[in-house]
């Protein structure tokens, strides 16, 4: 069941008419479906009923407090990568014992905040980070629960810029160093070794890399246990791809969960998942309005009011997003468009040479699958206000982040006194 679909030629977000919403909110804006978020996070609860995995939503994918609150109400935890994300997760009501902290550059201050909060686990990514965590924990008179993020050196991920599990990527501890580093960690009084962690990339389109990484991790767990480490947890990261409408769809989340379940059954570990895109990606769309249709010499440009600063995925990763008219017109001819924004960059595009039903200035368009890595990666480039985010639930809707005023956008800036 899809929560963004046309009924009688009009796009609905659940039971909310998107064109009416656009009239009320003003374009561009993001819309999220609460029902979709809930359905996606329940995949794990269903697949692992009775096994009590921790589903730590990767907050970087969509960090809006309302989104986090919805996921928290489903029992989800959070995977955070900064003090800011930690603060959001706690504020949304996610219990500290359901929070894991990832990232290659955690600062001492961030470690302290997380230790004070009493989070579940630090995923440590290097030898110097391990020392720093030990020092911070000792200074607080605490022991930091620690899993090492190991780099299994498997290639996975939809795009070079989002691959993370290869030797040349900055993430994780080199496979060959892991065992020695764990042995060292065991001797540190500020560290409590609890598990093993990997995360191999994002928008992964088949299950083979997960199986490869998992098989290596299982071997490591056996070695570490033989060395005398207590390994009770395995964090398998995130990374499962979602259908964006261009390529063969990635495996269904049920199949992914099934594979992990089968592989981990003999291991006797508590599983931690860090899904981001899988939960939020297809729970959101970006609604925009055509400003002009420009007939160029070689192309027809559909110039819309959303831009790369609102959704940077096409510019950054050549990502494909489906584009749909919000209101379908009967017998509209198809035309080839470059769909672009108003920002002064050639990389400001949403689609190139895309066949779409004919658009006119003023028509609304929906950029699909924009719920993950959309609003969170937005900027105010060209002094464009961050666009509002709206949550729908059945026929209800609420603005969950409003558009800032220009005064608010400038409020942090001051002119040096020698200029006044
Ligand atoms: C450590 C970690 N966990 C989880 C995720 C979430 O990934 P995804 O949105 O692909 O599920 C990421 C981002 O790739 C990450 O870096
Ligand atoms: N931001 C990327 C995914 C990166 C995942 C971060 N760990 C995307 O939009 O596809």
Image: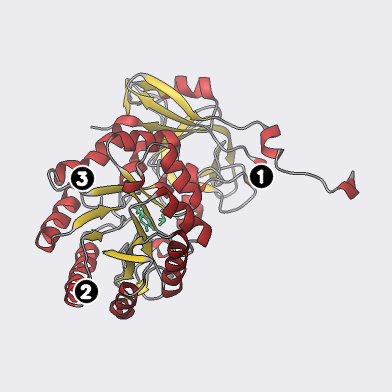
Q: Which residue bears the numbered disc 3? A: 44
x and y percentages locating residue 59 in the rendered image: 40, 47
x and y percentages locating residue 19 in the rendered image: 45, 23
Using the image as rendered, state which of residue 245 and residue 176 is in the foreground.
176
Q: Residue at x 22, y 74 (%)?
A: 224
x and y percentages locating residue 392 in the rendered image: 38, 26
Quarter of the image for residue 162 reads bottom left
Mark drawn on residue 169: none
Mark drawn on residue 382: 1
**At numbered mark 3, what does the secondary structure look like: helix, strand or loop?**
helix
| CB at disc 1 and ligand 2 closer than 8 Å | no
Quarter of the image for residue 321 reads top left
What's the CA distance linking mark 3 and mark 2?
27 Å
Say few, some or many: other residues with alpha carbon within 10 Å of mark 2 (under 14 / 14 to 19 / 20 or more): many
Q: Is residue 18 above or below residue 231?
A: above
- Does 20 sit left or right of 410 as displayed? left
Q: Is residue 268 visible?
A: yes
Quarter of the image that includes the N terminus: top left
x and y percentages locating residue 40 in the rendered image: 26, 40
**At numbered mark 1, what does the secondary structure look like: helix, strand or loop?**
helix
Q: Residue at x 62, y 52 (%)?
A: 345
Using the image as rendered, state which of residue 76 and residue 406 is in the foreground.
76
Q: Nearer the viewer, mark 1 or mark 3?
A: 3
Q: Nearer the viewer, mark 2 or mark 1?
A: 2
Q: Which residue bears the numbered disc 2? A: 224
Say few, some or many: other residues with alpha carbon within 10 Å of mark 3 (under 14 / 14 to 19 / 20 or more): many
Work out whether mark 1 precedes mark 3 in sequence or the reverse, and give the earlier one.
3
Marks 1 & 3, CB-CB < 8 Å contact: no
């Amino acid at each position: 069941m899809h929560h963004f679909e046309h009924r009688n030629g009009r796009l609905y977000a659940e039971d909310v008419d998107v064109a009416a919403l656009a009239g009320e909110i003003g374009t561009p804006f993001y819309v999220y479906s609460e029902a979709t978020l809930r359905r996606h996070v329940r995949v794990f609860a269903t697949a692992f009923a009775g096994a009590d995995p921790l589903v730590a939503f990767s907050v970087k994918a969509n960090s809006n407090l309302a989104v986090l609150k919805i996921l928290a109400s489903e029992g989800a935890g959070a995977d955070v990568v900064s003090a800011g994300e930690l603060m959001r997760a706690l504020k949304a009501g996610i219990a500290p014992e359901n929070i894991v902290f990832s990232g290659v550059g955690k600062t001492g201050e961030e470690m302290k905040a997380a230790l004070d909060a009493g989070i579940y686990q630090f995923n440590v990514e290097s030898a110097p980070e391990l020392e720093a965590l030990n020092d911070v924990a000792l200074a607080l008179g605490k022991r930091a629960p620690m899993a090492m993020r190991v780099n299994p050196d498997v290639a996975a991920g939809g795009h070079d810029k989002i691959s993370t599990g290869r030797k040349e990527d900055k993430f994780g501890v080199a496979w060959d160093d892991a065992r020695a580093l764990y042995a060292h960690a065991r001797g540190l009084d500020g560290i409590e070794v609890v598990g093993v962690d990997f995360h191999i990339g994002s928008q992964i389109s088949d299950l083979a890399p997960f199986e490869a990484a998992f098989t290596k991790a299982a071997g490591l767990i056996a070695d570490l246990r033989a060395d005398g480490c207590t390994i009770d947890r395995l964090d398998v990261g995130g990374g499962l791809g979602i259908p964006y409408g261009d390529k063969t769809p990635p495996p269904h989340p049920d199949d992914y969960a099934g594979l992990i379940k089968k592989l981990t059954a003999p291991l006797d570990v508590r599983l931690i998942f860090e899904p981001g895109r899988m939960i939020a990606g297809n729970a959101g769309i970006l609604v925009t309005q055509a400003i002009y249709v420009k007939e160029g010499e070689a192309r027809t440009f559909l110039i819309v009011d959303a831009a790369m600063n609102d959704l940077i995925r096409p510019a950054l990763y050549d990502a494909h997003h489906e584009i749909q008219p919000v209101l379908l017109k009967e017998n509209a001819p198809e035309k080839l468009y470059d769909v672009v924004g108003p920002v002064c960059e050639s990389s400001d595009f949403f689609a190139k040479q895309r066949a779409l039903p004919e658009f006119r200035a003023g028509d609304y368009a929906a950029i699909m699958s924009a719920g993950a890595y959309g609003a969170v990666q937005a900027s105010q480039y060209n002094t464009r206000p961050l666009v509002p985010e709206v949550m729908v639930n059945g026929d209800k809707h609420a603005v969950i982040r409003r558009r800032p005023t220009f005064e608010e956008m400038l409020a942090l800036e001051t002119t040096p006194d020698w200029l006044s």
